[in-house]
Image: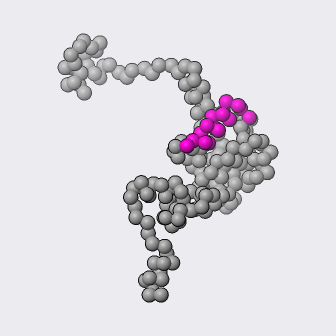
Amino acid sequence: AEDIYQNLPYATPHASVFEAGWPAAAPAQGEERRGRAAWAAVRSLRDEVNRNLELARAEKALGASLEAKVLLHCADPAVSEALARWSGASNGVDELRFLFLTSQVELVASATEVTERSLFSSTREEGPAATVGIAAADGTKCERCWHFDPQEQSQTYEGVCPRCETSLSLMGVAPRQRRAAAAAGYFGE
């Protein structure tokens, strides 16, 4: 880096690249500031989700966080809007379930509904006021990613969820034979 800096075709304000330091980020403005505030609020909700997950684990209601469904109600309209945006992410990556490390996240209409439908729940008043609940995830466990998915498992790749089916087909992985058919062929039946 120093060699390149010394041979730049224009004048530099410092004698060495190591004296230049790092450029300062521009202060956040408008929409970006609101986005950062919403992201900070959602990250603080993650702490509350983790507390409830640990309660469920301690009571042996769940073994792992991927066995859980998070039920969430937030009273703050700005945070609720951000949660709804991330909950319905269509890119398969920016989803709340990946932030919370659970199989499913459901945003519900009221705090009462959260407490009625969950195994463990808590309400927080500070930060973004929210009610967080933990319930057992719906559906069957994918053998590849271990997420529970309420959709029907793949017909092409046995035992995997639709998301993993897409990944496997994009990677060109050949489907394995059905277990029953493979066993019947192996035993000569």
* Rendered residue at 56%/57% (across/down): 147
- The residue lying at 24 percent from left, 12 percent from top is 11
Residue 14 position, x and y percent, is: 28, 15
What residue occupies the far front of the structure in this picture? Answer: 155
| Residue at 47 percent of width and 81 percent of height | 183
Magenta region:
75-90
Query: Which of 148 and 130 lies nearest the eye of the viewer?
Result: 148
On the image, the x and y values in percent for residue 68 come to: 64, 55
Residue 59 in the image, given as x and y percentages of width and height: 69, 59
> Looking at this view, is 147 or 50 the one in front?
147
From the viewer's side, name the closer residue of 60 and 186: 186
Q: Is residue 86 magenta?
A: yes
Identify the main secondary structure in magenta: helix
Where in the figure is residue 66, as x and y percent of width and height? Answer: 59, 55
- Frontmost residue, 88 versus 77: 88
**Magenta span contains residue 188:** no
